[in-house]
Image (cartoon, rainbow, N blue to C red):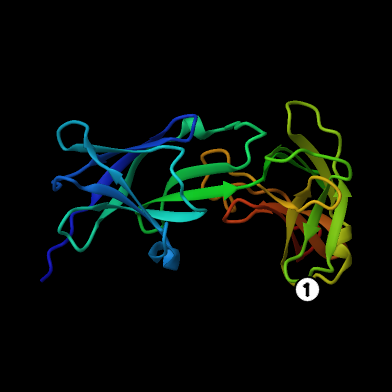
Amino acid sequence: MTPAIATVRADCAADPSGTLTFDLTVPASAPASVLLLRRRGAAGDRPGGTVRIPLDGAGPGRLRAVLPASTGLSEGRWDAYVEEPGSATPRTVEPGLRDLRALVDRSPDTEAASVSARVPYPTADGRLALRCWVRAPHAEAGAVVVGPVGMTVEGTLYGVAVGEGAAVEARLPGEPARTHSFPLAPADGPSGGFAFTLPYGPPAEGPVDAEQLWHLWLVPAAGAAGVRVSRILDDVWSRHRSFVYPAREAAPGVLATPCYTADNDLCLRLEPGPADR
């Protein structure tokens, strides 16, 4: 019988810059062990699909690894392991305490060319992983207000300025002809702020025989490329189940509901349904 490989438990803490510190409780570990981050799926076998972070002593039975915010990690999900010299199979890392308070309501420089975010989280089967985003530019969603005839969103735009003809577009994937554009509203507050109201009616004018997810894109100026509207600058790795908004009637027999995807992208969901649901 093959002996079981001992697992490792890791506590995680974040600082306001996005640097992550992992404090590992290790039953026994060989010298020169490293914390291995591997991008999930086939991407983990490609160049840049793994990152190794040295483990240093942090007390009896404790090792520490620091992932600076400047370390390049591609967007996606990264699984954590402890890799030991001479061992063909890395140890699984289980999640411990996660102190991610410093990630809440982060406000990077709005003039930065790109925005990145990393959130440690427990997988469904009890392992430690990182959800990473890299957006250039980026439209960060803030407050979402569900009105009777439309949804109003406030947010912050990073890496590009709002110019003449700026608008939000609701796009139905796979049907490029079904795109609806609405102008941005004047935004108060700090640099980069934006606001828009998306009425439910126009997307519901076409047939809605099954669920539709309309993706929201901010077009910063007439003719500019769209920027996906998402919410990534906090400690929530997947908000599609935790951020739930009420449904409103968009048309007879059609319900409209703001929602987030598993990747934290903001959408408008349309589906058949009674108004009193």
Along the viewing direction, whichever of 12 and 70 lies nearer the viewer: 70
Give the structural element (helix, strand or loop) at label 1: loop
Q: Is residue 268 left or right of residue 84?
A: right
All told, the count of numbered labels is 1
Indicate the quadrant containing the C terminus: top left, top right, bottom left or bottom right: bottom right
* Residue at 14 percent of width and 45 percent of height: 31
Q: Looking at the image, is 71 positioned above or below residue 193?
A: below
Residue 200 visible? The answer is yes
Q: Is residue 53 left or right of residue 184?
A: left
Along the viewing direction, whichever of 182 and 54 lies nearer the viewer: 54
Q: Is residue 218 left or right of residue 122?
A: right
Indicate the quadrant containing the N terminus: top left, top right, bottom left or bottom right: bottom left
Amino acid marked by disc 1? Asp
Q: Residue furthest top?
A: 189
Q: Looking at the image, is 56 positioned above or below residue 267?
A: above
Along the viewing direction, whichever of 108 and 244 lies nearer the viewer: 108
Q: Looking at the image, is 151 positioned above or below residue 251?
A: above
* Residue at 22 percent of width and 37 percent of height: 56
Q: Position of residue 64 (x, y in %)?
A: 27, 37
